[in-house]
């Protein structure tokens, strides 16, 4: 079998499936992806193939002007009935309110959902498609994030950021002229979301070593190929070059395919995403300004790489010292601290921890022994990661944000955010490792 990393993106899609040496059969539910010039004939063929007469369309004010008006005019000329909802707010947030708006305006006689946009529009449409059972086509207008082809929607529910089960688009289309004309800020955010895989892929490997978590080298290498291209060509992506826009959008679509293949979010997110999730939760709770997901993730990637730079070449942890530090941990103190940090949204974090019993002492001891036994393997992964300096250089050259202070996030908040990244999901990440070996607070004080 040809390696995933050597396949064209359409070879990875449904109905193709691959029996992998990782033990899984990999498949995606996405049936078609076309990125290029004049993609309307491909989109039209897909819509007609479903026997569609009436289409439920979602867009926001910006995406409607950028591409929606022209696209919907062409569809009307083809005789389709369009039920169109354009979000009235300047910025649409991926939360239960925006899903509620979509549900209230959803036309029950629609045969298909069509989303015109990127992150939030796509997340909402995936949920509406899942609920209604209608096929879903996405017309992507910007290369801003990596959730295009995933079967989850990243949503804020009850103050906590969740990956809500939904439905991947049946097909994704995008015109490179529209992508090239989109605001450079969107592309910079997308590059930040691609570079984040430097952290997530390494943490996936580390968790495989420490916890025996499922890992697939072929999926890993698929994402690494697009990641390597992004490191080389980031400046081209923000130049408006149409061929480059095709490459960056494919790099952002592939993680969704990879997540479907793996059945977990590991290929796409790690500690760098949890910086972003916590900042979003605080913004909602305390009324702070929100920034684009990819902008926050890009900054989170630099912070995570700073921590990994600190760990490079480190000797194996001392078991007794780690255990003594662990014994000072108080779950009641932790609850008080995280409530102060997150406000009301901390309650869901606390309930999730209690349900999953993440701080179980016996399980901790097993992890610690595994860490010490496999320390050389863990160090090999960490030592091979690029430095914060290298990735910061890429982000500076494209004009992306590189510091939390650019988003108004104070230094003390950054330190606490780092400490609580381990609590956002039941996913083993760098801050989890540092907690286990008794160095989390020390590294937080030293670096932040």
Image (cartoon, rainbow, N blue to C red):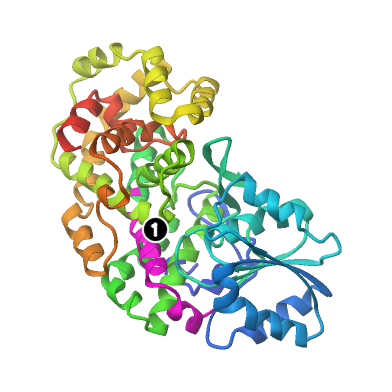
- Residue wearing tag 1: 193
Whether residue 248 is visible here, answered yes or no, is: yes
Q: Principal SS element in the magenta part? A: helix
- Which residue is depicted at the point 38% across and 61% down? 194
Q: Quadrant of residue 150?
A: bottom right
Residue 29 shown left or right of residue 244 in the figure: right
Q: Is residue 388 left or right of residue 223?
A: left
Q: Which residues are magenta?
A: 173-199
Residue at figure coordinates x 57%, y 76% from the top left: 65
Q: Residue at x 64, y 79 (%)?
A: 69
Q: Nearer the viewer, residue 92 or 295?
A: 92
Asked whether the viewer can see residue 167, the reply is: no
Q: Position of residue 361 (x, y in %)?
A: 39, 15
Query: Which element is circle 1 on?
Result: helix
- The residue lying furthest to the right in this view is 109
x and y, in percent, of residue 383 in the image: 19, 47
Tell me the quarter of the picture where residue 427 sits. top left
Label 1: few (<14), some (14–19) or many (≥20) C-alpha neighbours in 10 Å: many
- Above or below, 108 against 315 in this view is below
Residue 196 among magenta residues: yes
């Amino acid at each position: 079998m040809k390696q995933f990393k050597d396949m064209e993106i359409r070879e990875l899609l449904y109905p193709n499936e691959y029996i992998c040496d990782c033990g899984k059969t990999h498949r995606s539910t996405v049936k078609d992806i076309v990125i290029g010039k004049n993609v309307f004939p491909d989109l039209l063929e897909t819509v007609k193939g479903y026997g569609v007469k009436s289409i439920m369309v979602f867009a926001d004010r910006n995406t409607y002007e950028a591409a929606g008006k022209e696209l919907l005019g062409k569809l009307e000329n083809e005789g389709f009935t369009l039920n169109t909802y354009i979000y009235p707010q300047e910025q649409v947030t991926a939360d239960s309110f925006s899903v509620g708006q979509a549900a209230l305006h959803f036309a029950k006689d629609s045969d298909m959902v069509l989303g015109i946009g990127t992150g939030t529009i796509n997340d909402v449409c995936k949920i509406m498609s899942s609920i209604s059972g209608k096929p879903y086509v996405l017309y992507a207008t910007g290369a801003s994030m990596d959730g295009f082809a995933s079967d989850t929607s990243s949503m804020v529910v009850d103050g906590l950021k969740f990956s809500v089960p939904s439905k991947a688009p049946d097909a994704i289309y995008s015109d490179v002229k529209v992508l090239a004309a989109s605001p450079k800020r969107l592309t910079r955010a997308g590059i930040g979301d691609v570079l984040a895989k430097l952290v997530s892929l390494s943490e996936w490997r580390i968790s495989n070593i420490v916890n025996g978590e499922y890992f697939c080298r072929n999926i890993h290498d698929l994402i690494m190929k697009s990641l390597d291209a992004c490191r080389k060509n980031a400046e081209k992506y923000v130049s408006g070059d149409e061929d480059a826009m095709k490459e960056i959008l494919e790099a952002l679509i592939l993680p969704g395919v990879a997540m479907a293949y793996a059945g977990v979010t590991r290929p796409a997110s790690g500690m760098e995403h949890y910086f972003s999730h916590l900042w979003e939760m605080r913004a909602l709770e305390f009324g702070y300004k929100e920034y684009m997901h990819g902008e926050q993730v890009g900054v989170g990637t630099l912070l995570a790489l700073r921590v990994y730079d600190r760990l490079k070449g480190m000797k194996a942890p001392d078991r007794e010292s780690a255990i003594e530090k662990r014994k000072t941990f108080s779950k009641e103190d932790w609850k008080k601290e995280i409530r102060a940090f997150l406000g009301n949204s901390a309650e869901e974090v606390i309930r999730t921890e209690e349900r999953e019993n993440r701080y179980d002492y016996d399980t901790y001891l097993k992890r610690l022994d595994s860490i010490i036994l496999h320390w050389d393997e863990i160090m090999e992964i960490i030592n091979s990661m690029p430095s914060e300096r290298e990735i910061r250089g890429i982000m500076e050259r494209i004009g992306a944000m590189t510091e939390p202070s650019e988003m108004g996030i104070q230094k003390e908040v950054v330190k606490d955010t780092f400490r609580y990244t381990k609590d956002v999901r039941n996913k083993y990440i760098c801050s989890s490792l540092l907690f286990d070996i008794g160095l989390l607070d020390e590294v937080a004080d030293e670096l932040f």
